Image (cartoon, helix red, strand yellow):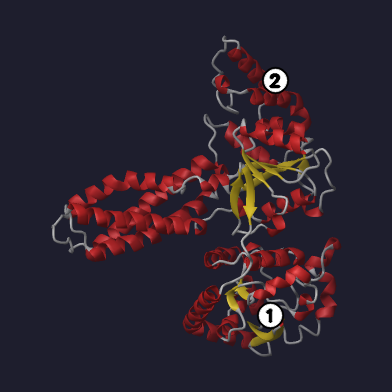
Amino acid sequence: MSAVPDQAGMQEELARAAAEQNGNGSAPTANAAPSGPPVSLRNSTEQRALSQAAALYDETIALIDERTLEILERRRKTATIRRRGWLIRRMLLLADVVGLMLAFSVAELLFGLDHGQHGVGLGIESAAFLATLPAWILIARLYGLYSRDEERTDHSTVDEFVAVFHLATVVCWLFFVLAWVTDLVDPSISKLLAFWVGCIFFVSMGRAAARWLSRKRITYLQNAVIVGAGEVGQLVAHKLLQHPEYGINLVGFVDSEPKERRDDLAHLTLLGPQERLPAIVRMFDVERVIVAFSKESYDVTLDLIRSMKDLDVQVDIVPRLFDIVGPSVSIHTVEGVPLLGLPPAHLLRTSRLIKRTTDLVLAIVSLALLAPAFAVIAILIKIGSPGPVFFRQVRRGTNEATFEIYKFRTMFADADARKAEYTHLNKHATNGGDPRMFKIRDDPRTTRIGRFLRTHSFDELPQLINVVKGEMSLVGPRPLILEEDQHIHEWARRRLNLKPGITGPWQVLGRSEIPFEEMVKLDYLYVTSWSVFNDFKLILQTLPALARSRGAY
């Protein structure tokens, strides 16, 4: 299977490009596969990239994995290459139109007889609504609701919920004000409110469905190359491979002085030194380049990044102090020099009150709604194996306090006594890893019902009792056992400034797949950059994380 043009084909393309530059170019043949913009639009960087690609083709094509070959083969067969941006923009636009029409239909079904003072029929209302759809789409574009998926690997519907809420609120309010000022129509308040709620709900759900469907298409995948095969570059690669939902296909690394690759990245290839990057981008249709601390000089790296802008490539740069850059970071400038601003790491009394009030209300409501499920799970646990329904364990809480955590028992009653027998199975201690966290995949001490509860994280539900008692929060750092907590020192103990949470960054991003040291850094960033919106986002992200069940054991 030929995934990319062979060397002769690439040389032919170069010849056509040169002929175009000389003014006597000819049209490409019917079966020529497009691999870039029309030859008349190629810049000098692309010309050099194509020339170098032809010379390196035989050397590099053998290094590429089957997945990359499949993506390239699919693209080369099409008359026009379709990428993530093309797919996701159309899917989101369709979702918005369908969501708006559903919101309008529901409002009409609920309050269709209420036409206000100026009786306007359903036909006129429907025609007027359909006529405003292009304006809705235009405003959504101004809000940036169609471009971020192509730029950001982890962008989700949760990230844009505020923008969707704001868009629906502003447009509905403007319509009401315009109707009141002009007196052309007298909109029903109840119908307008129903449309507003429906708009937020159906558009958000439609966008989530559009992304879910898009991620199943090979068109959604972006070929990516990491510049720098050192510790940071390999860490980025590991994280991307842990999240297939990001839709990133890693072609390989580019580095002149690579570090020995970690075991879980052995299948990723080294494509060569940095100077080959433009050729690699053109040869393998790379859409994203991630710059992650190579040993090249500042000027060389800067020139490389600038050359990527000539090749229409998304460039992501890992900041030098990425360990302390959280979601609350802001960017401002001093005479053109960008500065990353980190706000003071403290919570106001009002913030703590909001967090505690939200915890208490949601926990009490959840316990009331889940009471029947608690009863069913308790019966299944008692039938499955002898022992108590709840597992209780001392954990480290906020401000150095300790508390007893509640969980549904998922192991046999003597599991703690048998822990030493299975130390060699600890996932985090294998291959020279970090044994400070004890996690065993397919733990033999787990009961049959316990395995089911752990897979879906139902065993965590009794922690709602800890939330009501004020010992835990719905969202927060991971609650550590005392044995793990003794390994937390100095700056990392700031994670105790907030109550431990049922969910949090560790649970959302991978749970047991995340090693101890990285878990500590995630908790530190969460605490030092806490916000109400971030908690809300983590709660919503917990739902798809539970569905994926990754790291749940």
Residue 8: mark in rendering: 2
Picture residue at 82% right of the left edge, 69% below the top: 435
Picture residue at 84% right of the left edge, 78% below the top: 421
Which numbered mark, 2 or 1, is in the foreground of this view? Answer: 1
Q: Which residue is mark 1?
A: 399
- In what element is the residue under mark 1? helix
Give whichever of discs 2 and 1 has the lower sequence position.
Answer: 2
325 relative to 260, above or below: below
Residue found at the far front of this picture: 335
Residue 40, image x, y percentages:
56, 19
248 relative to 422, above or below: above
Say what amino acid the circle numbered 2 marks. Answer: Ala
63 relative to 552, above or below: above
Q: Label 2: few (<14), some or many (≥20) within 10 Å?
A: few
Residue 468: mark in rendering: none
Residue 423, image x, y percentages:
83, 74
Residue 171, image x, y percentages:
33, 54
Say what amino acid the circle numbered 1 marks. Answer: Asn
Identify the image quadrant of the N terminus.
Answer: top right
Task: Give 448 or 398, whichever is nearer the viewer.
Answer: 398
Identify the image quadrant of the C terminus.
Answer: bottom right
Residue 363, image x, y percentages:
52, 80
Where on the picture, by quarter, is residue 504? Answer: bottom right
Task: Give 405 or 186, whichever is nearer the viewer.
Answer: 186
Total number of numbered discs in the rendering: 2
Where on the picture, by quarter, is residue 478? Answer: bottom right
